[in-house]
Image (cartoon, helix red, strand yellow):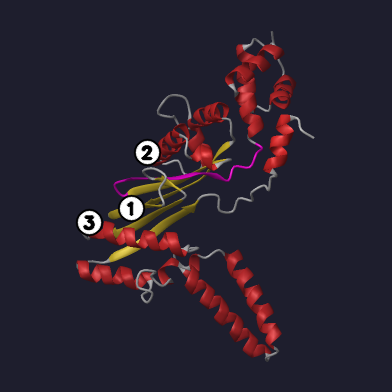
Amino acid sequence: MAYTAADVKNLRERTGAGMMDCKKALDEAGGDFEAAVDALRAKGLAAAAKKSSRTAAEGLVGVAVSGTKGVAVEVNSETDFVAKNDQFQDFVRKATEVALNTGASDVETLKAAAYPDGGSVADKLTNNVATIGENQQLRRIKHVEVSNGVVVPYMHNAAATNLGKIGVLVALESDAAADKLEALGKQIAMHIAAAFPQALTADQLDAELIARERKIAAEKAAESGKPAEVQAKMVDGAVAKYAKENALLSQIFVMDNKSTIQQVVDAAGKEAGTKIVLKDYVRFQLGEGIEKEETDFAAEVAAAAGIK
């Protein structure tokens, strides 16, 4: 029995499953529309797709390092309960390792990559949604690498090994001894977790952030009633202060409250007898930037129980 593109479209609308899953189901069902619907339901793909519209702002950040390479991956779930689930934790850990081993630098590439237990990462994620019963999403990935030196992982308040809510990677380029670099990297990673830098250097700060700060500073300066040239200096000073406080290398080290991170790195290099460069970093905090839905839990329970 043949089928058309319209059949694929209708099946997708009927079940909410992905287009390729619908096409495959129709192929396997010989074009029989209802059989394809049943097949998708049996595989849990229809249910998984319907769950995908629900906000997923909990979950875990995973980090993995091998030699001079490291990666951080964020995977979201709807509730913190799922983040404590062994099946979910195993998926985050293995997906992070796949990202590291394949070099996948975006979510779609990672989803298409082979999963250790068979199938693709996307297949495993879909299966998890169906079996665990919550929407789960691969959200973001970032790699760091040095040609010579170390990449140091750090997990703040770890839920399990290399899994938690704030994951940090610090990339240090140097000929210095690995143990010295590891110690330095961990201190800087702890600073990053606490201080939340927005970029490595002031030049790398997001232009939109700088523009917003300049606008705020201009409004404050205008309220002062001072001459225009004084206001301009006030604005420039406020923006410079913001940049200094939000660029990692110019931030004040939280552990001594006096040295900048650049000074800490330089001092470590001097002690090691060779230059150390803080080349890059990653700081993934679970759910940052996701707008969570406000829900009335009591109303949800009542609705589920049929209580008016």
In this rendering, the answer to whether 132 lies above or below 197 is: above
In this rendering, the answer to whether 132 lies above or below 211 is: above
Rendering quarter of residue 296? top right
Mark number, residue 52 = none
Residue at image point 69% right, 8% down:
1
Q: Position of residue 232 (x, y in %)?
A: 63, 84
Viewer-nearest of discs 3 and 2: 3
Mark number, residue 151 = 1
Q: Position of residue 291 (x, y in %)?
A: 64, 51
CA gap, disc 2 and disc 1? 15 Å
Residue at image point 45% right, 65% down:
195
Q: Nearer the viewer, residue 147 or 122?
A: 122
Asked whether the beta carbons under mark 1 and mark 3 sit within 8 Å of each other, the answer is: no
60 in the magenta segment = yes
The furthest residue to the right: 308
Crowding at dot 1, Cα within 10 Å, few <14 / some 14-19 / many 20+, comes out as many
* Label 2 sits on residue: 101
Viewer-nearest of discs 2 and 1: 1
Asked whether the beta carbons under mark 2 and mark 1 sit within 8 Å of each other, the answer is: no
Q: Position of residue 61 (x, y in %)?
A: 46, 46
Amino acid at pointer 2: Asn
Q: Secondary structure at mark 1?
A: strand
CA gap, disc 1 and disc 3? 12 Å
Q: Position of residue 293 (x, y in %)?
A: 67, 47
Residue at image point 49% right, 40% down:
83
* Label 3 sits on residue: 179
Rendering quarter of residue 261? bottom left
201 in the magenta segment = no
Crowding at dot 3, Cα within 10 Å, few <14 / some 14-19 / many 20+, comes out as few
- Magenta segment: 53-68
Pointer 3 or 2: first along the chain: 2
